[in-house]
Image (spheres, rainbow, N blue to C red):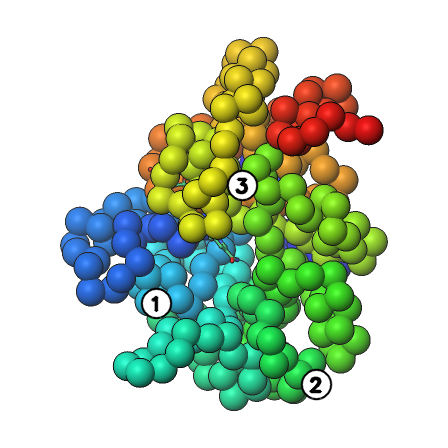
Amino acid sequence: MKEVRIGKSTLKGSRLAFGCWRIAGTWEARKVNAKARESGLKAILAAYETGYTLFDLADIYCEGISEELFGLALKQSKSLKKSALIATKCGIRIPEAGETYRYDLSADYIIQSCENSLQRLGVDCLDIYQLHRPDWLMDPNEVAKAFAKLKKTGKVKHFGVSNFKPSQVSLLQSALKDSLVVNQIEISLLQLASFEDGTLDQCQQHKITPMAWSPLAGGYLGNGKSNVLPSQEKYKPIKIRRRLDSLAREFSTSRSAIALAWLLKHPSGIIPIIGTTKPSRIRELAEADQIDLSHEQWYTLLTSALKEDLP
Ligand SMILES: NC(=O)c1ccc[n+]([C@@H]2O[C@H](COP(=O)([O-])OP(=O)(O)OC[C@H]3O[C@@H](n4cnc5c(N)ncnc54)[C@H](OP(=O)(O)O)[C@@H]3O)[C@@H](O)[C@H]2O)c1
């Protein structure tokens, strides 16, 4: 798979990233059994063998189990450990009994969360540490303090954000010494907001790599409804799927690979984070890296996704 530079950093990662949100097969740590652990490990190793070197995680994925499984994979494969770029996240608090589900980007919480992730992953340093969601009470100077400490102690190489609006990126960046390297947002043919709300423009202008989460709309653009988020439940992909299928025949590939190739075409350098846990699909989706859609083909898909004709 091709490699690309991440943001303004010197890091290079695979053109498609592998997302570890679903690898434990459940969101709840207490439900994870040995079989689920084994398939999670298989998925990580299949991704690496296929050429994915950028791995996306978060402390909350299956309440820490995704990070633990990734740590196990690193122990099993020295070459994975050598080549993997680890991107994980913090900032969403898993509530203890009686607590409110909330976001927390206070300096202490960022630093403590990072220590916990390093321990679960069994590594000394994270390549990219992302703030999972904007905290409504975010003080950029406090975040900057935490970032400076984590950088100085060698625990994090680069920082990024996720689900941040352009104004929130600018606010935070104004307090930081180093450039943010990624903004991770939901982007797919069924979620076009970032093309129009300035998010991708900002990424392109400031060389922040956009990473697309749910690039297949949680499964809707693949084989239909999967384990989707509540916000994705109303997605209606019928018309888009017909056009994806027609292009898939033209390129002798799958519908899902075309949906990812559509993201890869954008000049901001979107990195789709794939979320399948099936090794055969992990391999099939890597074909997207070989597909270069024409301007015309790209617009055919866009217009099938828009509710109204272009003016
Ligand atoms: N920053 C954030 O707020 C945020 C939020 C959500 C996700 N993420 C990141 O983004 C990653 C990807 O998200 P996602 O899992 O929603 O991505 P996705 O690729 O849009 O959806 C993957 C889901 O679609 C299913 N699927 C159905 N048909 C498929 C096909 N033909 N090909 C591939 N998958 C198919 C998969 O099931 P099978 O496993 O059965 O193939 C899987 O459940 C996550 O792992 C996580 O790292 C970040």
In what element is the residue under mark 2?
helix
Mark 3 or mark 2: whose residue is earlier in sequence: 2
Residue drawn where x is 74% and y is 61% of the image = 166
Q: In which quarter of the image is residue 203?
A: bottom right
> x, y percentage for residue 104?
52, 79
Mark 1 or mark 2: whose residue is earlier in sequence: 1
Whether residue 153 sits left or right of residue 31 in the image: it is: right
- 141 or 302, nearer to the observer: 302
Looking at the picture, which amino acid does disc 3 mark? Pro
> x, y percentage for residue 121?
39, 67
C-alpha separation, residue under disc 1 versus residue under disc 2: 28 Å
Is label 3 in contact with label 2 (beta carbons under 8 Å)? no
Residue labelled with disc 1: 64
Residue drawn where x is 44% and y is 30% of the image = 222
Q: Point out the quarter of the image occupied by ligand 1.
A: top left
Whether residue 153 sits left or right of residue 268 in the image: it is: left
Q: Is mark 3 within 8 Å of ligand 1?
A: yes
Q: Mark 3, residues whose alpha carbon is within 10 Å: few (<14), some, or many (≥20)?
A: many
Whether residue 185 sits left or right of residue 26 in the image: it is: right
Asked if 7 appears above or below 92 in the picture, the reply is above
Residue labelled with disc 2: 141
Mark 3 or mark 1: whose residue is earlier in sequence: 1
Residue 8 is at least partly visible in this image = yes
Looking at the picture, which amino acid does disc 2 mark? Asn
> x, y percentage for residue 78?
39, 56
- 97 or 267, nearer to the observer: 97
Residue labelled with disc 3: 215
C-alpha separation, residue under disc 3 versus residue under disc 1: 23 Å
> x, y percentage for residue 25?
28, 50
